[in-house]
Amino acid sequence: IPYVSLPFKVLFECLDIGNILFAWYTLACEQKVLLVSGQLSLLTVCSEILNSLLFPMKWTHLYIPVLPRSLSPMLDAPMPYLCGISRENFPYAVEDISDETVVVDLDRNVITLGPNTPDLPPLPHNRRKKLEATLKANAGEVFWEARNLTKADVLRVRASGDEGSLGTMLDKAGAVWEEKIKTRDDAFNLAHAPDSVSLQFDEDANVYLDDGSLPKQSRWDAVQEAFLRFYVSLLQDYRKFLPEGVKMEERTSWRGKEGLSSLRFQTDEFVAAAPSEFQPFLEELAMTQQFDDFVTRKMHNAADAPDIKFFDQSIDAKRNRSKLKIKKKDTP
């Protein structure tokens, strides 16, 4: 997957995997999301990371990672948005926040739903299990390590039934995290470029070994690829439902026979042809502006859209892997 110069570890330190998946899925279904933090750098970085996890889709609605106090009335806009606001300004914006907004507190790992937040369709069960398993395998301890704990420590105390000890442990962990993020803005920095010499000292980086061979995939590449695989599995047949036999560059009108467009993506047929567990999500996704943008770029600008080409190649690679397997095997 193409290198994305973003410190993914930051998001996984702020939110546990369950909350990351919920925030991502909320954006995938084009709902209103507001990030809150006392550190402006966290707002910017986490907004960009969540955006990148939507690939091959692109967020096409209102996007303001750091919302000024004077623009807080925009939080009641009648459209999806991804915005961030400082904790200092948050009290002044509360009355403006739409009752459909999902508020994600990056400092406290808390997600709050507005009273009228729309219900989302369920994630396809098997694909969710695979996605969650990959995230846990590669970044499952990051959230707890940032608080000087391990998940095993928490589970052990929780299993003992000692609520007092558990509360004390979590309070100390919260204090550790609060202390760490206080200086986050002062130390704010993006990840190194792929050719940076500093990467040789980065345990998470995917650099070449001394013998010139490729090393094991870095965990953050694996995290990005897990979300890519989710979309590849759900959209692997989308090209079958594009208009056929029409050279788009030669068309001067959208209208076909009897005044109807002959260039439309066959949305209903696409959803109906998918496995039943995929259909609720695909029905929601097909109604979004980001999916419309994705299909439009494929139909009208495929030659100049390297991201679309890469996604199509990923679908082809999945098909080729499936053909080579005599016996079906679960993939991450």
Image (cartoon, rainbow, N blue to C red):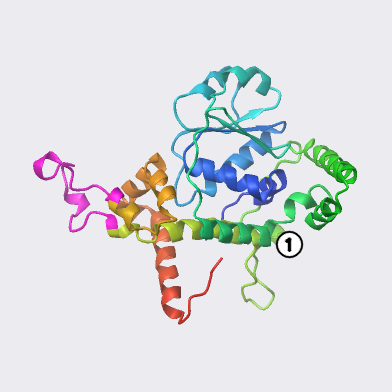
Considering depth in this image, is 65 or 235 the residue closer to the camera? 235
Q: The C terminus lies in which quarter of the figure?
A: bottom right
Which of the 4 quarters of the picture holds residue 23?
top right
Considering depth in this image, is 312 or 285 the residue closer to the camera? 285
| Residue 22 part of the magenta-drawn span | no
In the picture of the structure, the residue carrying the numbered disc 1 is 203
Where residue 317 appears, as percent x and y from the top left, is 43, 69
Q: Residue furthest left?
A: 258
Q: Residue at x 43, y 55 (%)?
A: 278
Where residue 74 appears, as percent x and y from the top left, is 51, 22
Q: Secondary structure at mark 1?
A: loop
Question: Against 222, is 113 above or below?
Answer: above
Bin the neighbour count of mark 1 within 10 Å (Cα to Cα): few under 14, some 14-19, many 20 and up. Answer: few
Q: Residue at x 64, y 50 (%)?
A: 8
In the displayed structure image, the side of residue 269 where residue 3 appears, left or right? right
| Residue 252 part of the magenta-drawn span | yes
Which of the 4 quarters of the picture holds residue 165?
top right
- Whether residue 312 is visible here, answered yes or no, is yes
In the displayed structure image, the side of residue 263 where residue 14 appears, left or right? right
Q: Residue furthest bottom?
A: 326
Where residue 174 appears, as percent x and y from the top left, is 82, 40
Residue type, label 1: Glu
Q: Residue at x 63, y 41 (%)?
A: 45
- How many marks can you see? 1
Where residue 77 appears, as percent x and y from the top left, is 48, 24
Magenta stretch: helix, strand or loop mostly = loop
Q: Residue at x 27, y 49 (%)?
A: 265
- Whether residue 2 is visible here, answered yes or no, is no
Considering depth in this image, is 313 or 230 the residue closer to the camera? 230
Magenta region, residue range = 241-268
